[in-house]
C-alpha cells in the first residue's frame, strides 16, 4: 500500500483516481451496513401495516375508503311568519287601524353532513347534530343510490346511527383509538360545503381530554387534527393510513367558521361503544355515581396525599356514591382495579359500566387508602339531569341542590339537607306561602326534602285544592308555612 501511495505521489492524477475509488467503496460499505441495520430497526418499530410505497399511500387509502363514506341530507319542516303584503295595510280592523297579521307558512329547513358505513347491513355512523330533530333523513351512497334513513341518537357524545334498508355495503373498520400517537398521519374524508368525497390530509395534532370545568372542548375526549375540516365534514371519518377509522369528525375551532387547522374528532373507541349500544338497546345505557369532581392540582395532591386521581367536590343525596360511602374530599384512584389518573378516566370507567354493577372503588381519605363498594345508578339523559339539578313547577319555586359551600355561606350546619330557593314567581303558591329566595326547604307535608328530585316528587304529590305544609330555614329561623295549591 505504501508503494502505491508513493507511486501516486509521483503521479497526481493516479492519486486522485485512487481516492475516488476508495471513497466510492467506503460509501457502498457504509450504505450497506446502514441499510441492513435500518431494516432491522424498521421491522422492530413498525407493528402496523403502513403502505410501503409512500408515493401511493394516500391514494390507496382514499380509494379504499371512498365507497364507505356517504352524503347525508336532513330535512325539517318549520313554521315561519311571513311579512304582510301591501294590500294588508288597507284591510282595516274594527277600530280603524290596519289589520296586519303575520301569514303562517311552512318551510323546509335543510342541512347536510357526512357519514361512514360501519356495518354492511345498512348502519351508518354520523354526528347527532347532523340528523337530530329531522323529519326526513336521506343517505346518498358513493355509487349514487339514495335511501331514506331511520335515526338513533346519543346527544351526550354527539353521535348517531342512521339505518338504511340495504345489504352488502362496503363497511369501514375501526382502529384502536387508545393506541393513536400524536404526530401520526390522519386523513379526513367527507362532504365539506356539500363537495362530496373530499379528502384532506394532516396529522394527529393532540389527544385532549376535557378535564376542567370550563367546557373548553366540544366533547369529553377528542382527537385534534390539522387535516382540513369544514362545515359538512361532520360525521365523516378520520382515518389512519391503514384505512381504519380513528375518529368521527365533529367540530372545529374557528373564529371565522372555516378551517384554521384545528379540528376535533370523537375517538373511535367511543364511537364503537355507542354504536354497539344503539344497535343492541336503541339507546346508550351508562353507569352513574352521582358526584361532581375535579382534577388534582400539585397543592391539593400534596395536602391530600394522592399523586393522581379524581377529587370529589360534591356527592348528590341518595346517589350511588352517597350510599356507597363516598365523601367530599375523597380522591378516587381506582375503579374495578383500573387506575384513575384524572376526572376523564373516572368518567369513562363509570359510564362504560352497566347500571346496577357492584364496583369497588379505592379512594385516598386522610392520606390513607380505603376501599368502598358502590352499586352504580343509571345516568339519565342530559335534559332530565338538567331538570333534576334545577327544579321549577306549578308551585312557582325554582330550586337547586344545597351544597356544603352554600350552607356555610347561609350560616347553616353542614348536616342540614334540603334545597335552596333561587326564585319565587310573583302570585304563585310559593309566593302566597311567604317563601323567599335563599330560603332552604327541608320538608313538605312531613316528607324530608334532601334533593331536587325529592322536592319535585313531593310537589307532584300535592293535589289541586290542597294546602301543603312547608318547613323552611331562613337564616337561624325555622318557619312552618302553608302553601295552598290551586
Image: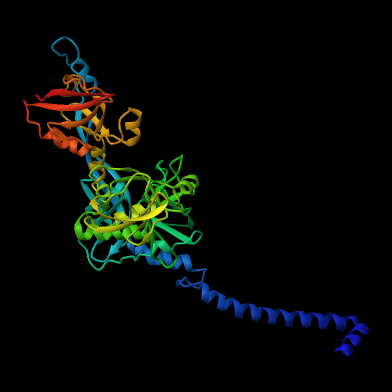
Depicted 150 relative to depicted 43: above or below: above
Left or right of 134, for residue 14 = right
Question: x and y percent of residue 375 in the render?
Answer: 24, 54
Which image quarter is the N terminus in? bottom right
Tally the marks.
0
The color scheme shown is: rainbow
Q: Decide which of 462, 77 is in the foreground and name it.
A: 462
Q: Quadrant of residue 79?
A: top left
> Would you say 271 lies left or right of 449 here?
right
In the rendered image, is residue 169 in sight?
yes
Q: Is residue 140 above or below residue 6?
A: above
- In the rendered view, does 92 fall on the left or right side of 24? left
Q: What residue sits 41% from the left and 62% below the top?
A: 178
Seen from the viewer's position, the closer of residues 10 and 254 is 254
From the top left corner, tell me how far across and down residue 290 is, in percent.
28, 46
Percent of width and height locating residue 147: 23, 57
What is the residue that sits farthest to the top in this orientation?
96
- Residue closest to the eye, 402 or 462: 402
Residue extending furthest toward the right: 10
Q: Is residue 83 visible?
A: no
Identify the image quadrant of the C terminus: top left
Of residues 388 and 303, the one drawn nearer to the viewer in this rendering: 303
Q: For the point 66% across and 78% down, which residue is it?
A: 31
- Whether 88 is drawn above or below 263: the answer is above
Where does residue 42 sit, x and y in percent of width and height? 54, 74
Amino acid at each position: 500500500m505504501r508503494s502505491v501511495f508513493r507511486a501516486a505521489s509521483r503521479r497526481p492524477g493516479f492519486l486522485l483516481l485512487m481516492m475516488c475509488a476508495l471513497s466510492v467503496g467506503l460509501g457502498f460499505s457504509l450504505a450497506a451496513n446502514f441499510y441492513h441495520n435500518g431494516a432491522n430497526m424498521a421491522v422492530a418499530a413498525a407493528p402496523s401495516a403502513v403502505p410501503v410505497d409512500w408515493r401511493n399511500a394516500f391514494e390507496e387509502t382514499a380509494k379504499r375508503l371512498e365507497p364507505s363514506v356517504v352524503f347525508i341530507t336532513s330535512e325539517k319542516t318549520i313554521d315561519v311568519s311571513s311579512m304582510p303584503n301591501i294590500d294588508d295595510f288597507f284591510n282595516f280592523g274594527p277600530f280603524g287601524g290596519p289589520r296586519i297579521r303575520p301569514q303562517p307558512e311552512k318551510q323546509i329547513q335543510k342541512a347536510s353532513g357526512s357519514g361512514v358505513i360501519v356495518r354492511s347491513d345498512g348502519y351508518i355512523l354520523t354526528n347527532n347534530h347532523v340528523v337530530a330533530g329531522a323529519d326526513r333523513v336521506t343517505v346518498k351512497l358513493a355509487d349514487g343510490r339514495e335511501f331514506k334513513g331511520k335515526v338513533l341518537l346519543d346527544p351526550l357524545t354527539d353521535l348517531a346511527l342512521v339505518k338504511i334498508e340495504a345489504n352488502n355495503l362496503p363497511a369501514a373498520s375501526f382502529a384502536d383509538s387508545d393506541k393513536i400517537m400524536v404526530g401520526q398521519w390522519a386523513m379526513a374524508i367527507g362532504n365539506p360545503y356539500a363537495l362530496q368525497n373530499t379528502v384532506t390530509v394532516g396529522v394527529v395534532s393532540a389527544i385532549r381530554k376535557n378535564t376542567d370545568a370550563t367546557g373548553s372542548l366540544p366533547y369529553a375526549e377528542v382527537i385534534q387534527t390539522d387535516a382540513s375540516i369544514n362545515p359538512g365534514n361532520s360525521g365523516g371519518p378520520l382515518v389512519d393510513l391503514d384505512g381504519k377509522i380513528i375518529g368521527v369528525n365533529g367540530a372545529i375551532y374557528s373564529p371565522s367558521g372555516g378551517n384554521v387547522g384545528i379540528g376535533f374528532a370523537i375517538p373511535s373507541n367511543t364511537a364503537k361503544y355507542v354504536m354497539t349500544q344503539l344497535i343492541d338497546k336503541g339507546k346508550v345505557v351508562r353507569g352513574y355515581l352521582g358526584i361532581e369532581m375535579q382534577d388534582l392540582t400539585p397543592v391539593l395532591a400534596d395536602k391530600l396525599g394522592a399523586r393522581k386521581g379524581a377529587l370529589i367536590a360534591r356527592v348528590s343525596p341518595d346517589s350511588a356514591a352517597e350510599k356507597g360511602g363516598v365523601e367530599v374530599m375523597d380522591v378516587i384512584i381506582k375503579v374495578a382495579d383500573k387506575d384513575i389518573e384524572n376526572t376523564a378516566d373516572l368518567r369513562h370507567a363509570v359510564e362504560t359500566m352497566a347500571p346496577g354493577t357492584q364496583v369497588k372503588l379505592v379512594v385516598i381519605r386522610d392520606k390513607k387508602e380505603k376501599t368502598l363498594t358502590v352499586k352504580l345508578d343509571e345516568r339519565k339523559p342530559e335534559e332530565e339531569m338538567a331538570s333534576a339539578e334545577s327544579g321549577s313547577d306549578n308551585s312557582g319555586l325554582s330550586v337547586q341542590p344545597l351544597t356544603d359551600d352554600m350552607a356555610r355561606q347561609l350560616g347553616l350546619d353542614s348536616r342540614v339537607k334540603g334545597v335552596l330557593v333561587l326564585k319565587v314567581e310573583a302570585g304563585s303558591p310559593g309566593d302566597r306561602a311567604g317563601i323567599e329566595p335563599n330560603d332552604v326547604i327541608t320538608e313538605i307535608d312531613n316528607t324530608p326534602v334532601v334533593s331536587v328530585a325529592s322536592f319535585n316528587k313531593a310537589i307532584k304529590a300535592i293535589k289541586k285544592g290542597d294546602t301543603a305544609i312547608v318547613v323552611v330555614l331562613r337564616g337561624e329561623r325555622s318557619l312552618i308555612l302553608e302553601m295552598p295549591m290551586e
